[in-house]
Image: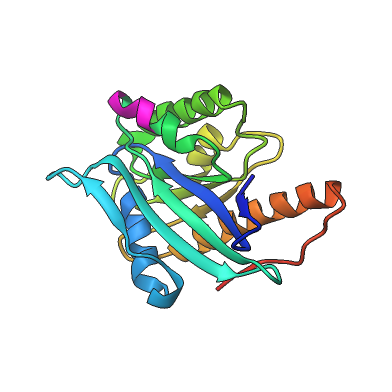
Amino acid sequence: MPAIDNKTRTLRFKIVYCGTPLSGKTTNLRQIHAKLDPQGRSDLVSLSTSQDRTLFFDFLAVDSRAVPGYSTSFHLYTVPGQVTYNATLQLVLRQADGVVFVADSQMDRQRDNLQAFQALEANLRIHGSGIERLPLVLQYNKRDLPNLAPVEYMEYLLNNRPVPHLSFEAEAYSGRNVLATLNAITQAVVARFQQAQEQQREPLRDLVMA
C-alpha cells in the first residue's frame, strides 16, 4: 500500500521497473522524464556504469492530480537485471505498489526474459506478495529491432495465466508506448488502493495522471 502522510496530506506510490540487463528499463525512465512537464516530475537520478548498465537503481518521481485534500506522487525505480545484484532487487521491491516488467523482444533474449520473470516472482514471495496480487504490466520492448520474437510467443512465456496482465509492444528508445505503460500501471495501483479503501469503508475519488 502507498505511503500516506496525513500531516502533509500526501500519497506516495512505489512502482518498480524490472527486467533483464539492457532491456530498456532506464530508457523508459529517461523518456518519461523527457516527455512530462518539468513542474510535474523530479530530476532523474541514475547510478550506472560506463557501459550504461544500472548498478543500483534509477529514480524518478511523477506527480499527479490528487484526491481532494491530498497530493499524489508516483515514485518510479529501476533495478539492475544482473543476477549478481539480486539483493538490490529484493531491497527495491520491498513495499512496491506495482511492477512494470520490461522484456527484450529479440529472440535470443527470451530465456533471459523468462529467468528474470521467475526471479521477480521469487523475490515478491520473499516479501509476502505475488504476481497475481500485485499490479503488474508487461512491456515487450525493442519492437523496432531485427530478429524479433512473435508477441504471441512472449505472451506464452510470460503472460500465460488465467487472467493475463495488461501488455504493450513498445520502442522505449523512440518513446512508443512508454507513457501508455506508465498510465496503465499507475491506474492499476490506484484501483487497487481504492478497492482497499472501499473495504475499509473509506471510498476515494479517481486519481488521474497529470
Task: Give yes or no for residue 85 being in the magenta stretch.
Answer: yes
Q: How is the image coloured?
A: rainbow
Quarter that holds the C terminus: bottom right
Q: Quadrant of residue 60?
A: bottom left
- Residue 133 appears left or right of 110: right
Which residues lie in the magenta part?
A: 84-88
Q: Position of residue 10 (x, y in %)?
A: 60, 61
Q: Residue 139, relative to residue 157: is it above or below?
A: below
Q: Position of residue 106 (x, y in %)?
A: 33, 42
SS assignment for the magenta stretch, majority: helix
Nearer the observer, 102 or 15 = 15
Task: Give yes or no for residue 63 being in the magenta stretch.
Answer: no
Q: Residue at x 62, y 26 (%)?
A: 128
Q: Residue at x 59, y 62 (%)?
A: 8
Q: Residue furthest left?
A: 50
Q: Residue at x 61, y 55 (%)?
A: 5
Q: Residue at x 48, y 26 (%)?
A: 118
Whether residue 132 is visible here, answered yes or no, is yes
Nearer the observer, 22 or 61 = 61
Q: Residue furthest right?
A: 201
Whether residue 144 is visible here, answered yes or no, is no
Q: How many marks?
A: 0
Q: Quadrant of residue 124?
A: top right
Quarter that holds the N terminus: top right
Q: Position of residue 130 (x, y in %)?
A: 61, 30
Q: Residue furthest front?
A: 7
Nearer the observer, 172 or 130 = 130
